[in-house]
Image: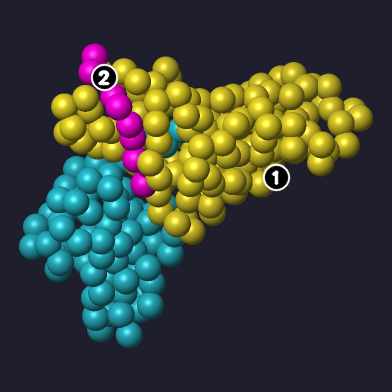
């Protein structure tokens, strides 16, 4: 099983792709752990996070099969 | 209570008339309507167009959550929210928030709250196209403007 990761807006363009698929680790994980694993560094400031399409935090628990999204501050309206 | 995403230009007043035709208006003393349009100037530069990216699925869920939380706080009879996505031209309508209630305070305050939360919580992102052909992502919404 995997954890699906999405990127949006400027972040998607900066990373050059709209997502990643990550093999779920043995133990508990978080969006911050996934970011460090995928991008070899700390998450950038002002990064927003969603888990399963709900607003979340960098330390929200993430489980096998979850959908995680990273994006910049939203600018709708 | 519903959310509507439009990939093409739409007329907010036609939409409002459609919504009102579906409502029993008896007892609803107050309607508040906010219509937001794309400006052709931002940060002292001419803006020729815009692209509105969104997170399909989460966008609709978040709009529904924002409306439901307003309906839990104020006595609302109905609420409809419309938002553009995709390529947008100056003067196109970007957002409509319409709220119906028995009295003015609930309609007015709930409408304002829904719009502010939409701007800061619902996953939409604007990328502007400038007169010289370059593009830029907006970093944030201007607070309180």
Residue at (38%, 72%) from the top-left corner? A66
Picture disc at residue B49:
none
- Which residue occupies the extreme right position in the image? B26
Whether B97 is drawn above or below A56: the answer is above
The chain coloured yellow carries which letter? B
**Residue B50 lies within the magenta run:** yes
**Residue B18 lies within the magenta run:** no
Q: Circle 2 is placed at which residue position?
A: B46
Residue B120 image position (x, y, % from top left): 42, 36
Q: Is label 2 in a helix, a strand or a loop?
A: strand
| Residue B104 seen in the current view | yes
Picture disc at residue B1:
1
Q: Give the range drawn in magenta.
A: B44-53
Say which of B136 and B97 sits in front: B136
Which of disc 1 and disc 2 is earlier in sequence?
Answer: 1
Mark 2 neighbour density, 10 Å: few (under 14) some (14–19) many (20 or more): some
């Amino acid at each position: 099983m995997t954890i699906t990761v999405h990127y949006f807006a400027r972040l998607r363009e900066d990373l050059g792709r709209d997502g990643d698929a990550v093999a779920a680790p043995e133990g508990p994980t978080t969006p911050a752990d996934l970011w460090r694993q995928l991008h070899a560094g700390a998450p950038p400031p002002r990064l927003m996070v969603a888990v399963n399409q709900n607003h979340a935090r960098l330390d929200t628990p993430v489980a096998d099969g979850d959908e995680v999204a990273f994006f910049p501050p939203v600018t709708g309206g | 209570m519903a959310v509507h995403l439009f990939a093409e230009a739409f007329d907010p007043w036609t939409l409002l008339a459609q919504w009102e035709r579906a409502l029993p208006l008896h007892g609803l003393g107050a309607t508040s309507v906010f219509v937001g349009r794309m400006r052709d100037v931002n940060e002292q530069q001419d803006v020729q167009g815009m692209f509105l990216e969104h997170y399909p699925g989460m966008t609709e869920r978040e709009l529904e959550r924002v409306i439901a939380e307003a309906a839990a706080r104020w006595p609302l009879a109905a609420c409809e929210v419309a938002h553009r996505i995709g390529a947008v031209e100056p003067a196109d309508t970007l957002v409509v928030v319409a709220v119906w209630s028995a009295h003015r305070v609930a309609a007015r305050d709930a409408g304002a709250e829904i719009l502010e939360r939409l701007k800061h919580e619902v996953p939409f992102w604007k990328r502007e196209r400038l007169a010289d052909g370059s593009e830029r992502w907006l970093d944030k919404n201007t607070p309180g403007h």
